[in-house]
Amino acid sequence: MKQQRIFPGVILLGFGAYFYLQQAHIILFSEFFTWPTLLMIVGIAFLAQGYVGKDYEAILPGTILVGFGLHFHLVNRMPVWPDHMGVFVLILALGFLLRYQKTGTGMFQGGLFLVLSILMLFSDQTAGWLGFLGGQLGSIVSLWPFVLILIGAFLLFFKRK
């Protein structure tokens, strides 16, 4: 049974704590008074609704919001954290895979986004691994957006039996 009071309860608790700590001028939390923290609060509310309230469709937006908020916090604080588009795709993949764990749907999308994020994050290393292609690698790398478009069009317009 889905409990609909969890999401607004967590939102109100999170925002209340956020604004109280901001008004109290507690120096320990001063660097967290930014919009990524608000993203994370809303994401945590979605995740609580998804896991505690058994509304498993809320897991995907919760993971996305918490992941994006965490990324924006870490990208300027940790030099090893990648500031790359592949991180966003990896967060999407994680959301689909976590939702698949509870609903049984979204494995294909999660796997597809996971492979795409790995290719994006490690594109420099992939180019080195594929060095045996020589000059042909440049033409292959420039065509990958069109490959994605073709796969997307195939999935949208051709029905499987």
Image (cartoon, rainbow, N blue to C red):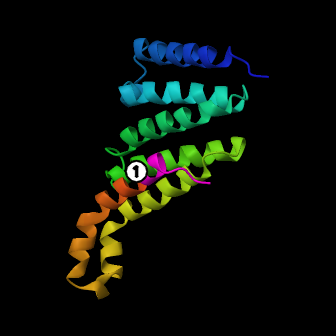
Q: Is residue 67 above or below residue 120?
A: above
Q: Quadrant of the N terminus?
A: top right
Of residues 54 and 150, the one nearer the viewer is: 150
Locate residue 76, reporting x and y percent: 31, 44
Residue 96 magenta: no
Residue 91 seen in this snapshot: no
Locate residue 80, reporting x and y percent: 36, 57
| Left or right of 40 on screen, residue 82 | left
Of residues 83 and 3, the one nearer the viewer is: 3
Locate residue 26, reporting x and y percent: 43, 21
Task: Report the number of numbered marks.
Answer: 1
The residue sitting at the bottom extreme is: 132
Q: Residue at x 42, y 56 (%)?
A: 151
Q: Residue at x 47, y 61 (%)?
A: 115
Q: Which residue is mark 1?
A: 153
Mark 1 is surrounded, within 10 Å at the Cα level, by few (under 14), some (14 to 19) or many (20 or more) other residues, namely few
Q: Is residue 106 above or below residue 135?
A: above
Of residues 147 and 2, the one nearer the viewer is: 147
Q: Quadrant of the C terminus?
A: bottom right
Q: Residue at x 69, y 47 (%)?
A: 101
Q: Quadrant of residue 122?
A: bottom left
Locate residue 103, reporting x and y percent: 70, 41
Q: Residue at x 42, y 59 (%)?
A: 116
Q: Quadrant of residue 133?
A: bottom left
Q: Quadrant of residue 23?
A: top left
Identify the amino acid type marked 1. Ala
Mark 1 residue element: helix
Residue 70 seen in this snapshot: yes
- Give the magenta part as a residue range: 154-161
| Left or right of 129 on screen, residue 9 | right
